[in-house]
Image (spheres, coloured by chain):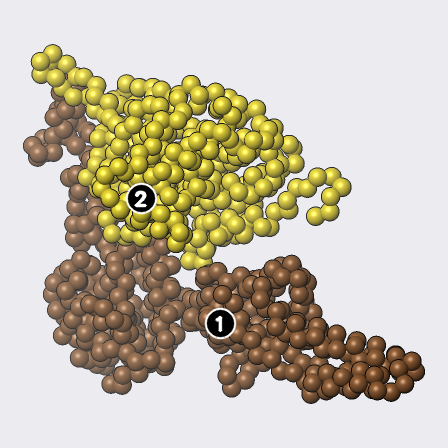
Chain colours: A brown, B yellow
């Protein structure tokens, strides 16, 4: 199947040339043949040119292939990169003096771009000889958070003898996607990693132990429980041995992000800052190997009707988080944050630490109070006095009341 | 029998069961020739376990399988000393690792501690249980499978040291439409399902391994491989580059690749083909790098940047 849809724009001279050619041939036959033979040859030449152009416009894209694999280019704002545009002419017809015209979303910027009403346009000259493959490396710069695509690809191919042009429009989508992550904005984060519950996070300082994670034995000490005695090791050494097990705690975070403007269903104007802070918190958790779950009140289909990243840790989880943050389209609508809070109450028992980022309203207090009652610590990201930092829920509400 | 003939025969035999994925079969044979372990990764349902079982059937030798789950303990893999009340003595009962072909199915479902129980056996072909060391007869190959999409649900990423011990990591792709049609037709009935037969004996395999060692590597190719390895160690987005074990694995894999093509010398194309399979799982990306690239993508970028050696007098 052809990849391109063709649109032919012939110049006035295209048909005029054919008419002139026929006129010359007519004259050469009905005039004095010998005197005007050169006129006939000229007519034949013009006919040949016309036919060559006709065949060219008909077949130039028959075996033209745009290499269009699915790929994602991920960047942070202000980062520069390039994408490779690959075109392969399997046939013999060359494209000389062609123009590549791309329309793309405004989360990226390319050199020599033009902004129009339909989008941002980039143009580049290209030549492809017959049975040749070319690679155009197109540099670009990430401008703002979001997900973008090349919306249209158009190749403008001039006629072989230059009095008209063929426009080739890519059918379907150009499959390269650009993801620009949110900027990571740091804020003060005091050490809140005190073990509070039994869990599976390894910690040297926890009071909790995982009885199944035995990594050695030590000599028995009076007071060691009987079920901690390693009977096999005792039998081998002929000396009472107690199992040494790993110390563990539960240390996962639940991050709730409210991106809704107060009492309005649209996004808050602070959305980029909130997402930047969320990204930082997730990066910190990843560096400390702390599992985290993120809930954002942006609508999504499914059993959980808003963005929810299930609990996880590690680099892959962090990459997935950044991608989710990048995919939030601030031109859409949001969901009621109380729904996120309702869901959070059901999962809060798995997370000893709960963080609130974004707009805070008084009607969230009962929900957060219930979470605290279940044993979790709630902290709110406070922007007061130009100092950004996490503060306990109680301090935050007191500060706001003052 | 020549190396490339054996490869063709194995491809044909395994192809009865696994339709498509010829490149994967070739790569596994490459690992087999090098006594190397293979980590097979793909989405569920692409035939990883069936492929591993088929490979095992084509080799003369013992085959064992460990189905990894979170409650599998290191001693379940390596073996234990158990107290025999009859003799009033401790007796050694070796685990499934003492075999020729070990299928470690869904390896990332086991805890890192259990995964690490394979470290010694994969590198040194021996297992130590309570101060007693048991040597394992050659050939010894671990074919491990893992599913990449469940990275957070009851699974544990393999530790770097463990990954480094895998000779290559292979990602199985979906079959093409025509291949999938053949799969549907082959497995339509429940009877007369194809099953591979033994192709290669232990002695033949040892002989092959000897032959492959004689494949010539020119200095220019050596430099090319070293340049790639060095570039991974100096790349800004990579925290840990390829280890010397990785360089050795690359060298051996390109020798086997050349032998499998019926050549007694290595070309840069062999290096370009094998480097992503042998090296990509050995690099550890930085936190920022891991948010932007996958390991094979970054390695591909590194390979693109290294000039390819050409014969003297030929223009680049």
Decide if residue B294 is on the left or right side of residue A231.
Answer: right
Q: Quadrant of residue A109?
A: bottom right
Checking the image for residue B288, the label placed there is none
Task: Kindly identify which chain the residue marked by label 2 belongs to.
Answer: B
Decide which of A103, A2 is in the foreground and name it: A2
Q: Residue at x 41, y 44 (%)?
A: B21
Q: Which residue is mark 1?
A: A171
Q: Which mark's residue is nearer the viewer, 1 or 2?
A: 2
Q: Residue at x 42, y 58 (%)?
A: B291
Provide residue A253's location: percent of width, then percent of height.
25, 60
Task: Kindly identify which chain the residue marked by label 1 belongs to.
Answer: A
CA distance separating discs 1 and 2: 36 Å
Number of other residues with Cα within 10 Å of mark 2, as a class: few under 14, some 14 to 19, many 20 or more: some
Count of numbered labels shown in the rendering: 2
Checking the image for residue B186, the label placed there is 2
The secondary element bearing badge 1 is classed as loop
Provide residue B181's location: percent of width, then percent of height.
35, 51
Decide if residue B255 is on the left or right side of residue A27.
Answer: left
Q: Residue at x 12, y 63 (%)?
A: A374
- Outermost left residue: A226
């Amino acid at each position: 199947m052809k990849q391109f849809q063709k649109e032919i724009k012939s110049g006035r001279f295209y048909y005029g040339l054919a008419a002139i050619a026929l006129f010359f041939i007519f004259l050469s036959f009905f005039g004095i043949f010998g005197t005007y033979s050169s006129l006939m040859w000229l007519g034949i030449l013009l006919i040949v040119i016309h036919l060559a152009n006709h065949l060219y416009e008909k077949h130039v894209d028959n075996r033209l292939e745009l290499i269009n694999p699915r790929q994602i280019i991920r960047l942070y704002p202000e980062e520069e990169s390039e994408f490779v545009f690959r075109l392969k002419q399997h046939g013999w017809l060359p494209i000389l003096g062609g123009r590549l015209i791309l329309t793309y979303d405004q989360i990226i910027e390319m050199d020599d771009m033009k902004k129009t009403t339909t989008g941002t346009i980039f143009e580049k000259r290209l030549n492809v000889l017959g049975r040749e493959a070319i690679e155009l490396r197109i540099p670009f710069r990430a401008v703002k958070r979001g997900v973008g695509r090349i919306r249209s690809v158009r190749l403008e191919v001039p006629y072989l003898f230059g009095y008209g042009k063929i426009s080739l429009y890519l059918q379907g989508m150009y499959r390269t996607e650009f993801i620009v992550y949110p900027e990571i904005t740091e804020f003060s984060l005091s050490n809140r990693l005190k073990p509070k519950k039994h869990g599976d996070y390894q910690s040297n300082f926890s009071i909790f132990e995982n009885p199944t994670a035995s990594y050695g034995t030590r000599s028995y000490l009076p007071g060691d429980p009987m079920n901690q005695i390693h009977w096999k090791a005792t039998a081998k050494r002929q000396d009472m041995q107690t199992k040494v097990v790993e110390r563990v705690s539960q240390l996962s975070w639940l991050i709730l992000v409210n991106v809704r403007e107060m009492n309005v269903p649209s996004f808050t104007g602070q959305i980029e800052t909130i997402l930047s802070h969320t990204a930082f918190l997730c990066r910190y958790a990843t560096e400390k190997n702390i599992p985290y779950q993120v809930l954002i009140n942006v609508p999504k289909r499914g059993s959980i009707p808003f963005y929810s990243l299930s609990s996880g840790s590690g680099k892959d989880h962090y990459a997935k988080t950044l991608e989710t943050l990048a995919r939030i389209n601030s031109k859409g609508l949001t969901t009621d944050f109380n729904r996120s809070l309702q869901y959070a109450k059901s999962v809060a028992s798995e997370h000893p630490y709960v963080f609130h980022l974004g707009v805070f309203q008084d009607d969230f207090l009962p929900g957060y109070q219930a979470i605290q009652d279940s044993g979790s610590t709630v902290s709110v990201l406070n922007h007061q006095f130009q100092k950004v930092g996490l503060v306990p829920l109680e301090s935050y509400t007191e500060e706001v009341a003052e | 029998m020549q190396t490339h003939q054996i490869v063709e025969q194995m491809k044909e035999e395994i192809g009865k069961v696994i339709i498509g994925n010829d490149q994967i079969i070739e790569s596994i044979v490459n690992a087999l020739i090098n006594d190397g372990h293979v980590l097979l990764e793909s989405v569920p349902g692409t035939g990883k376990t069936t492929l591993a079982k088929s490979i095992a059937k084509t080799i003369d030798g013992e085959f064992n399988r460990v189905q990894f789950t979170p409650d599998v303990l290191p001693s379940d893999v390596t073996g234990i000393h158990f107290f025999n009340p009859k003799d009033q003595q401790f007796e050694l009962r070796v685990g499934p690792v003492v075999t020729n072909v070990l299928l470690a199915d869904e390896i990332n479902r086991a805890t890192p501690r259990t995964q690490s129980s394979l470290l010694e056996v994969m590198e040194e072909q021996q297992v130590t249980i309570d101060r007693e060391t048991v040597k394992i007869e050659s050939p010894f190959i671990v074919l491990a499978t893992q599913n990449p999409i469940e990275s957070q649900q009851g699974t544990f990423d393999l530790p770097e040291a463990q990954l480094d011990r895998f000779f290559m990591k292979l990602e199985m792709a979906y079959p093409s439409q025509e291949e999938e049609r053949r799969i549907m037709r082959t497995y339509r009935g429940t009877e007369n399902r194809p099953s591979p037969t033994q192709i290669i004996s232990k002695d033949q395999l040892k002989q092959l391994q000897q032959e492959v060692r004689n494949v010539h590597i020119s200095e220019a190719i050596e430099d090319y491989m070293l340049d790639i390895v060095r570039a991974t160690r100096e790349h800004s987005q990579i925290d840990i580059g390829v280890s010397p074990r990785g360089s050795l694995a690359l060298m051996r894999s390109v020798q086997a690749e050349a032998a499998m093509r019926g050549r007694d010398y290595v070309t840069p194309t062999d290096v370009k083909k094998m480097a992503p399979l042998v090296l990509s799982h050995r690099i550890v990306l930085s936190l920022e790098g891991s948010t932007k690239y996958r390991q094979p993508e970054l390695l591909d970028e590194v390979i693109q940047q290294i000039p390819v050696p050409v014969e003297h007098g030929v223009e680049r």
